[in-house]
Amino acid sequence: MGRGKIVIRRIDNSTSRQVTFSKRRNGLLKKAKELAILCDAEVGLMIFSSTGRLYEFASTSMKSVLDRYNKSKEEHQLVMNANSEVKFWQREVASLRQQLHNLQENHRQLMGEELSGLSVKDLQNLENQLEMSLRGVRMKKDQLLIDEIQELNQKGSLIYQENMELYKKVNFIRQENMELYKKMNLESQVYETRGADIVHRAPTIPHNFCIAEDAHVPIHLELSQPQQTDGVQPGAPKLGRLQLH
């Protein structure tokens, strides 16, 4: 007769549990060695008993097996993440395409196109939407016009103030010119009065002198020789005759 099927569950008897653990542990370690040798596989096996004792087997070394396991796990995680990211972006692209299609269809309907498939209620909603949009556009236009008018009024006020300042400066310069004109008239009158006084006080020309018209004619002075006269001492000096040419 064959062996009956054993139910896989925790063995309550501690002695039976320990015996089963030893037998199956040795069998597992033996299978791991055979698998590494027969299939040229890198095998690493670690077993912890209920008491915390470690049993291990490695076809090369446990460190090499663990490094290879961690590296393979990281690569697998990256592949899974990449696949997940690709799927995520594929879903995003599909959603954006659907949104774009809806927006294009809505735009065509707002432009009055492709209205054949709409019901009366849909057309009423579209009409209300257009009226609200038109109201918003008009309000925005009115606000822009009001802002422009206010800005022009402010500019006009600034220009008016600048004109007033320029008008004050022109008046001030005009007053200064009038004062300068008066001073010039007074000074000209003073110069004319002084000129008349100089003419009246001009000295008379001596009898024996004449003023030539040409100022560039040279003047020649000559001294005559002294002459002896009666009744005059010989040693007394006598002025010569002055001749003007």
Image (cartoon, rainbow, N blue to C red):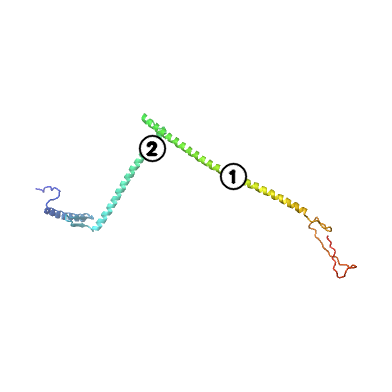
Residue 161, position as x, y percentages in the image: 55, 43
Q: In this view, does 80 lie above or below 113?
A: below
Residue in front for this viewpoint, 190 or 15:
190
Residue 29, position as x, y percentages in the image: 18, 55
Residue drawn where x is 65% and y is 47% of the image: 179
Q: Mark 2 points at which residue?
A: 103
Q: Residues within 10 Å of mark 1 (few under 14, many from 20)?
A: few
Q: Mark 1 points at which residue?
A: 168
Residue 201, position as x, y percentages in the image: 77, 54
Residue in front for this viewpoint, 24 or 161:
161
Circle 2 SS class: helix
- Answer with left or right where residue 232 lies relative to residue 184: right
**Furthest residue in direction left, as rendered:** 1
**Furthest residue in direction bottom, as rendered:** 235
Q: Is residue 197 visible?
A: yes
**Furthest residue in direction right, as rendered:** 230
Residue drawn where x is 75% and y is 53% of the image: 197
Quarter residue 119 falls in: top left
What is the three-letter code of the residue carrying label 2?
Leu
Q: In this view, does 170 lie above or below 235?
A: above
Q: Is residue 59 above or below residue 139?
A: below
The quadrant the C terminus occupies is bottom right
